[in-house]
Image (cartoon, rainbow, N blue to C red):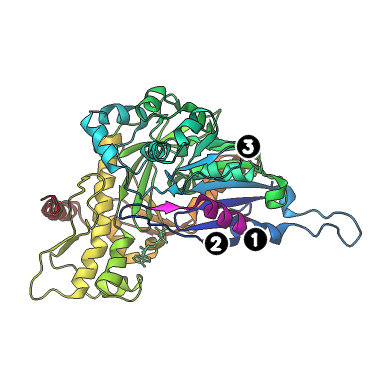
Amino acid sequence: MKHVLALDQGTTSSRAILFDRAGQAVAVAQREFRQIFPQPGWVEHDANEIWASQSAVARELMEKVLPAPVGADGRATKSIADEMCVAITNQRETTVLWERATGQPVANAIVWQDRRTAPRCDELRLQGKAGLIQKKTGLVIDAYFSATKLQWLLDHVPGARARAERGELAFGTVDSWLIWNLTGGKVHATDASNASRTMLFNLHTLQWDDELLRLFNIPRSVLPQVVSSSGVLGHTDANVLGAALPIAGVAGDQQAATFGQACFAPGMAKNTYGTGCFMLMNTGTAAVPSRNKLLTTVGWQGPAGPRRTAYCLEGGVFMAGATIQWLRDGLQMIQSAPEVEAIANLVPDTGDVYLVPAFAGLGAPDWDGYARGTLLGMTRGTTRAHIARAALEAIALQVADVFDAMARDSGIALKELRVDGGACSNNLLMQMQADFLGVPVVRPKVTETTALGAAYLAGLATGLWQDAAEISSQWQVDRRFEPQLGAAQRRAKLARWRQAVERSKAWADN
Ligand code: ADP
């Protein structure tokens, strides 16, 4: 093997990236697809459009690497495609239900952001199921995860439940849907990192859980087989990509990014600064239960040793880059996101102004759906520069809260934080982050860590890379931000922030 074709199926676009042995992206193609909002709070994708966009970008790259059928000497030529495998990483939790016979979806996919099953989640909480679900799945009861979405489809699509019970339907998260289509309907599988986001998968036995299947009234016949994140699970149908390539690596996007950041040892963590933030910390072979409302999740299964499983703790911040989008689109204070850095740099501090961007409530560790955005501490001297700076601080302070919860849950003192995602290019934000964490923040040269992580999982299974050590040696620092704030100042800053967070809580709960 010499190359990996990584398919990165995201929430708004599908991408294909070809990686070489050095872990460098040698070709990229990307295509957006439709977001469907049938009602307030509902978010759907047409699964056929997901597949159409994903297969189109994959084929676009394949056309670059497939040889002309015969060379000048009349013989078939060798091509990159002869020594290539496929990796998949995907938006997580999004739920697809399709007909086994035709491969046609029976309804639109319900996207992770969709809130239609929030009432069902309230009911489960009232029934006292939170403890059971957390113990078995590592998850907090929320509409975010697949189980209630699948139950909704089985209950609302005419005939679906009866057909599912007859074994005619297949369920999958987006990874399964891609695998099914890539293999021409031969393989119905998911990997353990994706399975662990369904709320039907037992983290400890690493199997679908009968008690949870009963709770959500899901017939076992719809479920995909759970396979290792690193290993050949099947081959692409030659009609689909023009060649039969081994599919050798699969992981959910955040877990793949953690792998791409080479966070292989317990206590290593990465944070992705996108629209929201996702922090994942490797906790090794132990599934650490959270006492601070973080999630416990499978990081990946394999490749170190036979089917070895790495677990992670995960914490999300809803409004990270989205806070900067709000400065741009809501307040129209800046024209583009990167501008925020120069404006925030006009002042040495926020002048005790705090912005709590609880625009959609607060996530981990506060989980207050009724909290709302709050701007406080303003005086006549407050300028937009102070507010811009407070917005950047708010991102870093929310991340510091998650980081602190992780350290408390795991009992591991994190030594550094690896970063990626669109907003990690902001040097001021990264310096603030190091200051508020009290540990160095490290930005790698390659920040395309999601696709790269999936590529690594596939390449390890096919001999492109030998082991984790070889991958770790490819990971290179772009810049390291050392904390410059003293411990006492840091504690005072975090305490002041917590006061601000408290004032944002329960605002919409009237
Ligand atoms: P996603 O994958 O969630 O779409 P990206 O990783 O592409 O997000 O990052 C884009 C987000 O990062 C946007 O919300 C944008 O506001 C923010 N962003 C981009 N550049 C900067 C910057 N220099 N400073 C602060 N925020 C930024």
**What residue is pinned by disc 3?**
232
In the rendered image, residue 85, in percent from the top left (x then y), is placed at 65, 46
Main SS, magenta residues: helix
Closer to us: 36 or 462 = 36
In the rendered image, residue 222, in percent from the top left (x then y), is placed at 50, 32
In the rendered image, residue 428, in percent from the top left (x then y), is placed at 31, 65
Vertical comparison of 374 with 380: above or below: above
Element on which disc 2 rests: strand
Vertical comparison of 163 with 2: above or below: above
Q: What amino acid type should be assigned to the residue bearing mark 1?
A: Glu
Q: Quadrant of ligand 1?
A: bottom left
On the question of residue 475 being in view, the answer is: no
Query: Mark 2 touching mark 1, by CB under 8 A?
Result: no
**What residue is pinned by disc 1?**
60
Query: Mark 2 touching mark 3, by CB under 8 A?
Result: no
**Distance (Cα) linking label 2 and label 1:** 9 Å
**What residue is pinned by disc 2?**
30
Q: Residues within 10 Å of mark 1 (few under 14, many from 20)?
A: some
**Residue sitting at 24 percent across and 69 percent down?**
388
Q: What amino acid type should be assigned to the residue bearing mark 2?
A: Gln
Residue numbers of the magenta segment: 43-58
Sequence-first disc among 2 and 3? 2
Sequence-first disc among 3 and 1? 1
